Amino acid sequence: MAVAHWSRWGRRGEKVVRRVLPRSFLGRSLLIVLIPLLVTQSIALELFYGNYLNVVSRRLSDGVVGELALTMDMLARHPQDSAWILARARERTQLDITLRRHAHLTGRSSVGVLGPMDEDLAHSIDLTFHVDCHIDWNADAQSVRVQIPFGDDVLEVIAPRKRLDVGPIWLFVVWAVGSSLLLFMIAGLFTRNQVRAIRRLAEAAEAFGMGRDLGPIHPEGAQEVRKAAVAFNRMQARVVRFVAQRTAVLAGVSHDLRTPLTRLRLTLAMFPTEGTLRSADLKPDIDDMVADIEEMERLIGSYLSFARGEGAEEPVATDLKVLVDEVAQATARAGGTVINVHAEKPCIVMVRPDALRRVLTNLADNARRHGGRMAFSLKPLSRHVEITVDDDGPGIPAFQRQRVFRAYDSGEGGGLAGGNGLGLTIARDIMHAHGGTIRLRHSALGGLRVVLTLPL
C-alpha cells in the first residue's frame, strides 16, 4: 500500500513538473543552462555578502571606533590640551572631531543603508563606550555624522564614508546579474544553433515520411547531430534506392510476363474447336505452353526472392572457410569446375549464413554459366574479411560494372538468378545488410572477379 501511495504521488509530481517545464528542446536546454548559472551567482553573492563583506565592514568600524576611543581617552587624561589633541586627531585620522561643550545629542540616527555597515558601526560603539549615540548616514553623501556623549559634552565626528563603506554593493550585484545575462545570451545563441540543426533534421524526416524527397540535408551542429544527419542521409538513400529497385523490378516482371502470356493466348486461340484431335498433334503446342508457364514461374520466383530479402534470418557466428568449401563442393557437383579454394585458416564472423550462401551460390552459378572454371579465395584482414570469386568467362567491361547492379540491367555479362538481371542486385542488398560491400574487378583467370567484403 505504501509503495502504491508513493507511486501515485510520484506520478502527480511528474505531471506538475511537466506542466512547469518548457515543452521545446530549446527552452529546456536554456533552463539547464540558466539554473546552474543562477545557483552559482547566488552562492557567489552569498559568499561575498555573508562573509567577506561582513568581515571587512566590522574591521573598518572597529578601526574608526578605536581611533575615537583613543582620542577620547587622551581628552579625558589631558583636558587642558583638548585643542591640540583634537587638531592632531583630525590630522592623523582623517576624522573631523569636534568637542561641543555642555551640549546634548541632537537629531536622530538614520538607518536604511544597503549593507551591514550601519549595524556594525553602532554595535562597535556600543561595545566600546556603552552609551547611546546618534549616527546619521544621510547627512552627507561623502561622510557619516556621529555624536557620542562625553561627560557633560558631546563629541561630534564627521567620518569619511570611504572609511566605513566597503564600496557600492550595487556594483557587485550589477556585475553578477549582467555577467549572468551575458553568459545566458551567449549560451542561448549556441543552443539555438544546435536546436536549429535538430529542427532541420526533424523537418527533413517529416517531409521524407510524407513522400517529399528534399535531397540530403547538410550535416551541421554538434558531432552527435552531424552523425544523426549523416545516418539520415544514408537511410534516405537506401530507402530511395529500395523503392526504385522494387518499382523497376515490378515494372520488369510486368513487362516480361506479357510476352509468355501473349504466346499462351495465341496458342489457345489457334486450337481447333471442332472435330477430333489427336494428342500427338497437340504435344508441340502443349510443350510450348508448359515452357511459357515455367518461364513465368521463374520470373515470379525471382521477384519474390528479391522482394522478400533476408531480413528474417538472425546473424550467427559462422566459419566462412566451411561455408566457402560447401559452396565450392556444391558447385562441383552441379557441373562447375573449381580449380582452387584458398582459405588458410578458419574465420569466424557474425553473418546470416543462408543469405551469404545464396550470394556465393549465385556468383558460382554465374561463373559456371559464363565461363566454366572458377576459384574461391578467403582472406582475413585487420578489420574485415575478403571473399573473392574468380572465373574465366567473358567478364564485364569496366564502364558497365556499376550498371549491372541495377535490377533488370544485366549488361554483357548477364545477371544472376537465371539471367533476369536480379542476381547482382540481390547480392548487393544482402552484402549491404551485413554492413559489407561487393565490387567487380578484372580476374587473373581472364574473366570477372567479384570481391565480397564483410566487417569483422
Image: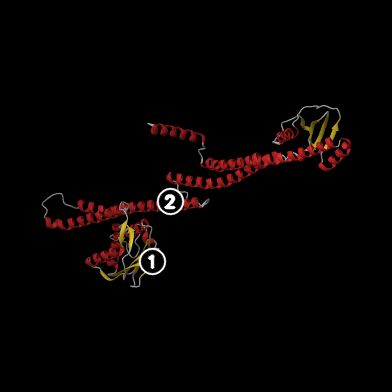
Which image quadrant: the N terminus?
top left
Q: CA distance from mark 1 to mark 2?
A: 31 Å
Marks 1/2 in contact by CB < 8 Å: the verdict is: no
Residue 246 seen anywhere in this rendered image of the structure: yes
Residue 347 percent location from the top left of the image: 32, 64
Residue visible at 74% across and 31% down? 130
Task: Name the amino acid type tagged 2.
Answer: Gln
Q: Which mark is residue 236?
A: 2
Q: Secondary structure at mark 2?
A: helix
Above or below, comparing residue 200 to residue 115 in the picture: below
Residue 119 percent location from the top left of the image: 71, 33
Q: Say which quarter of the image contains residue 327.
A: bottom left
| Residue nearest the observer in this picture, 49 or 234 | 49
- Which residue is most to the front? 77
Q: Say which quarter of the image contains residue 91.
A: top right
Which image quadrant: the C terminus?
bottom left
Chain-order first, disc 1 or disc 2: 2
Task: Report crowding for label 2: few under 14, some 14 to 19, many 20 or more residues within 10 A (C-alpha).
Answer: some
Q: Which residue is mark 1?
A: 381
Q: Say which quarter of the image contains residue 406.
A: bottom left
Q: Secondary structure at mark 1?
A: loop
| Residue nearest the observer in this picture, 268 or 353 | 353
From the viewer's perspective, tell me whether residue 277 is left or right of residue 455.
left
From the viewer's perspective, tell me whether residue 62 is left or right of residue 323.
right
Residue 271 percent location from the top left of the image: 17, 52
| Residue nearest the observer in this picture, 146 or 420 | 146
Task: Name the amino acid type tagged 1.
Answer: Leu
Above or below, comparing residue 247 to residue 116 in the picture: below
